[in-house]
Image (cartoon, coloured by chain):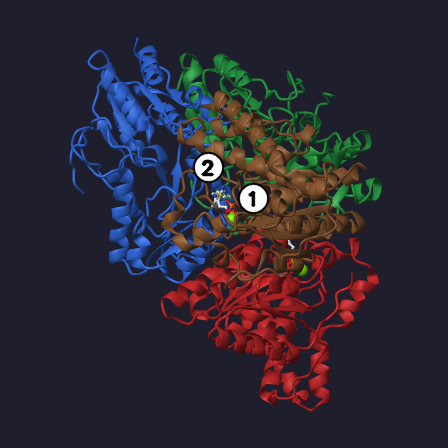
Chain colours: A brown, B green, C red, D blue
């Protein structure tokens, strides 16, 4: 079974150039941090790193679309969202360096701690949303989950709970095609989006190559959630460029071609090229971001090397 | 806290009535507190412990949960993050296991993971224990399971009054508490007399009978059988009975002081013996109270075997007679 | 939300009169046993009884349709199936009298022990089917589950496993509208049938009032499973005539009308009336079954009163 | 069973290599046996313990499981009913909890529920323990969790040779066995010398160092630190080291005999102290070996607190120095 997008790429036309630059900037910064994390891990400064390369468009697009009011329940790979939400780069790496289990202030940033026990956070997210609603407070919650983790009972229980309670929860599944070495098409017969519908949760499945597609789909999803006060699920197909984590050797179980396809579909380079081509960003702008990234990497090196 | 003497004649509220009243009072005074469990609302719980609470406080605060224990505890964890204080109910001890992951890897660690920014006051009430001819899985005692885990406290009150104190303390603790409520005590009225001596603190053990010859450390429903045995043995053997009330953390000071006075320790519990609460107590006393011991520490608890069908449970459970026999062996 | 049948009553015309009499006979016997069990429970001979009244058409129809080769993984309420499969009445009551955890020979009857931890058996059933297939043996399995139990993570995990492994498993959900005091429409937003489809399992939702409807639907499901070597789910709506168990008082949480509706929709009396009306059974036949039931009840009384 | 002396110089297979070889041999000779776990096939497991087995025995017998621990154990239970012998792998100790329900309420009781008609030979291998700077949840030791339950056996081998013996025994036992494999030993080559004395039976403890002054009962990875401490202390203090190998059921006879000779008992384990395996051993000795004791029984194990982030794990774990200090205190 081959995964297919239900909706093809659709470049939303209504996006402001500011928004587009913002999307690209966050993607570039996340990529820079990810590269630096790999370097630091090799040198022994980090214990482990779960790369987000290939996930940037999905993460930045969805996080910008829902806005800063939404509370985010991440997995352990939403580094681009962490940065976008204001987690400082060194705070983000702290747990991967063995210093703490959460380097940032979850409440202030509305970006909750990474959860390493797969799918456990899905129930927390729904419970939190219900709790907020009961107290008459903002109950919009975004729960991230990977394709593999959706097999855990907790994920199905969370979908059912959200559906029954009509909770204001956006589930975002970043389907990168793999749960370590297990291909997504051997993890499920349908799709996460179809499964959500079975529980009574509207859903859509989109490509995660283009941040604008993601932004549009998640904006619509957010509008649905706020309008209907009901949950929604967006399944985003992304490519996993690096191995599962730095201890993984994906060459053992993925073909060279398959890895090459993920690399070729790199959302960061392609979006940078597109915005350059459209004249939305120019060399000066790109140089500015590059300088910012360089500075960040230097600071991280000082802190963690 | 009152210190009324409980006797078999004075009419005091039953265990279930006490909990019901405490929950009602907490709901009344703590707007952020809510109840969550299977069938606790419309039905008032399969043991009718939460009877009337939904009518009084509404379906939003007395929530008939989905039939999924991981959902119950998992959503409660999220609710604590939003500032609420959920009191969950698991229908029977034997159905706790689907919630173990959320309790052990999540509820108990959230505070630490959040560097103290979240203080999850989260209570899980679990009806426990046997002796009422239950069907499979309905008569177990698994308090030792959670007692191992840092970040979880475990209470095993043996009277409604203690359950009241435990619950009131639990909702303020800032970390998860599992409260085991003995099913066979819910509606029982005639319980043996105990000393009215108050506990030193809400988490301290209670000396429910003063004695000089031997200490029995116990907790939960079987405290009553222990007291009965102790009363029967007097005046030949004068047994001191310590009702631990909490099994994690344990109030070892009270136990050790008692053993210093009596020189002998028997531990009695209903949960199976291996790697149980009794083991922890014995190990602590074998280390810290070794010099005060006049003989071997002994444990009286069911052997390592499955809780059998109802027709055989009396052979499985520890009764008053076995407790008396054991005391006599130890003091002869 | 009110539950609606997706397919209306459809009286299969192709059923032999022998089959129809067999359906009715098993239903009448099961009802007789159930009545006796209540009596014995009241007298203290049984600890507890989980009544199957209202479920008879669903149970007998499905069990006859799949035939004796299928291995059955029941919940704790499939008494009609137990009897049909050859569990002796006294063997069936043994566990409710506190004598054992399973009174019969599971392998010989291909009727496995009751499981009281909800939904745990769903994974066993799928695993057993996979195990049988791996050993080149009959892998047709029927897993029974209640509406409430479908909320447990294990049920979703079992559906996913069966779908991914394309296991020869028929899931039969007897949706009696209640999980003790929780109405099914508060337990889920959709239906169990829709949920199964989300996982990639074909499904149908039928009324369980008429055993012939059930027989036909389950025959088709079984043919699908054997033909496609893929799972299937049949959701059968039934009425719960008695309380959840003998310790339950459903009057506390069900309206008088609602209970009356379940009683009025009694599948046993209505099927008996229908077959009598059609002349498929006559008084002599009915008397014969009644005598059989009476004898069974007397034996049980001797054994358990 | 061979009785080769393991030394730091002789090149013996590593722990991981031993298990790999044993699993290969079992798959070779037992057609009904299969492996089931996350990433054990294509990848050969996250620790590469099952490397090459899928290629050799096929994807049907070396099964890359769905990402769901309850599914893994739950389907394995069904497989045992069909006559197969599944050896499951849980990826890390910390991810065992979603499978607890299927293990405790199902796998462990199926035999009893079926009146002995099913003998579920079902093994669950679990990589365990810390000391390798793991991230959250990746360094725990929860063997005491299952040790409580009748119907489940729990093994904690400390060498590849013992793991081999444990696994071969486990697949024939007719009831579930959980085998804890210390992560930090998987690929370690230099381990302290131990006495070659064979065990009395596959489930018996091994005396891995004979001594006269004090008995240390231990198991799992930390056995090596205990041995190192014992070697360091000699000849001033002559420590006897008992490697339990199985923690449920426990071979108490070997421990009691040892204590009869030495008069002193220290229990060392890596899992946290409270209601742990050490408690059970101490309690048994405080009862059955009381008269042979010359001083308090002591336990050395991490205190009741969450396993901390990697930078703080050395403060959490028990090291060679602490073991030596403890022995010196007990024998001075
Ligand atoms: C309950 C649990 N089981 C197993 C693991 C080990 N594990 C960590 S990540 C992972 C794969 C997750 O795949 P997916 O959900 O697709 O997320 P991805 O890593 O691809 O982003 C596994 C098996 C875990 N962390 N938690
Ligand atoms: C894991 C678990 N949780 C709770 C229970 C207690 N319990 C027994 S039956 C039941 C309701 C089941 O409802 P449903 O699945 O609809 O089946 P029905 O009884 O209606 O046939 C509950 C909550 C249990 N047996 N197992
Ligand atoms: Mg993935
Ligand atoms: Mg039901």
Could you tell me if residue B131 is visible in this image?
no
Is disc 1 placed on a helix, strand or loop? Answer: helix
C37 shown above or below A219: below
The residue wearing badge 1 is A268
Position of residue C34 relative to residue A126, above or below, is below
Would residue A248 be visible to someone looking at this image?
yes
Is residue C99 or residue C44 the one in the foreground?
C99
Residue under mark 1: which chain is it in? A
Q: Nearer the viewer, residue C266 or C229?
A: C229
Residue A245: image location, x then y, percent: 45, 40
Asked if the residue under mark 2 is in contact with the one under mark 1, i.e. CB atoms within 8 Å, the reply is no
Query: The numbered mark 2 sits on a residue in which chain?
Result: D
Pinpoint residue B275: horizontal percent, then vertical percent.
44, 33
Residue at point 56% right, 78% down?
C65
Examine the image and state in which quarter residue B27 appears.
top right
| Side (left or right) of D120 relative to C100 | left
**Can you tell me whether the CB of the residue at mark 2 lies under 8 Å from the nearest atom of ligand 1?**
no
Q: Is residue A79 above or below residue A160?
A: above
Residue at image location 30% in from the left, 51% down from the top? D52
The numbered mark at residue D145 is: 2
Crowd tier of the residue under label 1, counting other residues whose Cα lies within 10 Å: few below 14, some 14–19, many 20 or above: many
Spatial distance from mark 1 to mark 2, Cα to Cα?
A: 46 Å
The residue at 71%/29% (across/down) is B164
> Farthest residue in the top direction?
D332
Task: Categorize mark 2 by other alpha carbons within 10 Å: few (<14), some (14-19), many (20+).
Answer: many
The picture quadrant where one finds residue B305 is: top left
Name the spot of residue A271 as percent of width and height, x first.
Answer: 59, 46
């Amino acid at each position: 079974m081959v995964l297919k997008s239900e909706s093809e790429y659709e470049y939303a036309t209504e996006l402001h150039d500011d928004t587009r630059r913002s999307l690209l900037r966050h993607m570039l910064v996340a990529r820079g941090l990810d590269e630096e994390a790999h370097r630091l891990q090799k040198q022994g400064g980090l214990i482990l790193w779960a790369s987000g390369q290939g996930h940037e468009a999905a993460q930045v697009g969805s996080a910008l679309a829902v806005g800063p009011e939404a509370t985010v329940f991440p997995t352990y790979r939403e580094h681009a969202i962490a940065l976008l939400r204001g987690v400082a780069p060194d705070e983000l790496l702290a747990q991967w360096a063995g210093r703490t289990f959460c380097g940032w202030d979850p409440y202030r940033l509305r970006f909750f701690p990474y959860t390493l026990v797969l799918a456990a956070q899905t129930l927390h997210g729904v419970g939190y949303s219900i709790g907020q609603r009961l107290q008459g407070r903002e109950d919009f919650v975004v729960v991230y989950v990977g394709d593999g983790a959706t097999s855990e009972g907790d994920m199905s229980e969370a979908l059912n709970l959200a559906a029954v309670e009509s909770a204001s929860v956006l589930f975002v599944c970043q389907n990168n095609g793999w749960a370590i070495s297990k291909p997504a098409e051997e993890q499920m017969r349908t799709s996460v989006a179809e499964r959500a519908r079975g529980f009574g949760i509207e859903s859509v499945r989109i490509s995660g190559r283009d941040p604008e597609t993601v932004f549009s789909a998640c904006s619509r999803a957010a509008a649905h959630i706020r309008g209907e006060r009901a949950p929604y699920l967006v399944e985003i197909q992304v490519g996993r460029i690096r191995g599962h984590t730095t201890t993984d050797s994906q060459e053992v179980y993925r073909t060279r071609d398959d890895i090459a396809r993920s690399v070729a579909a790199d959302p960061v380079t392609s979006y940078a090229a597109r915005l350059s081509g459209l004249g939305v960003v120019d060399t000066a702008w790109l140089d500015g971001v590059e300088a910012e990234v360089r500075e960040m990497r230097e600071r991280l090196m000082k802190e963690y090397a | 806290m009152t210190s009324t003497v409980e006797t078999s004649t004075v009419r005091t509220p039953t265990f279930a009535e006490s909990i019901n009243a405490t929950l009602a009072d907490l709901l009344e005074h703590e707007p952020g507190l809510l109840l969550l469990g299977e069938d606790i609302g419309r039905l008032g719980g399969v043991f009718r412990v939460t009877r009337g609470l939904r009518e009084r406080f509404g379906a939003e605060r007395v929530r008939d949960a989905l039939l999924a224990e991981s959902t119950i505890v998992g959503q409660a964890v999220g609710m604590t993050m939003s500032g609420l204080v959920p009191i969950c109910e698991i229908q029977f001890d034997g159905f706790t296991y689907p919630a173990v992951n959320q309790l052990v890897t999540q509820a108990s660690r959230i505070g630490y993971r959040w560097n103290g920014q979240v203080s999850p006051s989260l209570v899980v009430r679990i009806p426990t224990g046997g002796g009422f001819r239950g069907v499979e899985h309905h008569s177990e005692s698994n308090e030792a399971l959670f007692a191992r885990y840092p970040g979880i406290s475990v209470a095993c009150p043996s009277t409604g009054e203690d359950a009241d104190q435990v619950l009131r303390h639990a909702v303020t603790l800032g970390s998860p508490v599992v409260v085991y409520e003995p099913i066979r005590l819910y509606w029982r009225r005639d319980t043996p007399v105990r000393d009215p001596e108050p506990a030193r603190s809400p988490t301290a053990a209670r000396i429910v009978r003063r004695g000089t010859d031997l200490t029995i450390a116990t907790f939960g429903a079987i405290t009553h059988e222990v007291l009965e045995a102790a009363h029967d043995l007097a005046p030949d053997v004068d047994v001191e009975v310590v009702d631990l009330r909490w099994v994690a953390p344990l109030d070892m000071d009270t136990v050790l002081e008692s053993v210093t006075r009596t020189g002998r320790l028997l531990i009695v519990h209903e949960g199976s013996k291996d790697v149980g609460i009794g083991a922890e107590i014995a190990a602590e006393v074998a280390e810290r109270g070794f010099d005060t011991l006049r003989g071997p520490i002994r444990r009286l608890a069911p052997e390592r075997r499955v809780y059998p069908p109802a027709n055989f449970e009396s052979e499985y459970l520890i009764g008053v007679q076995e407790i008396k026999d054991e005391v006599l062996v130890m003091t002869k």
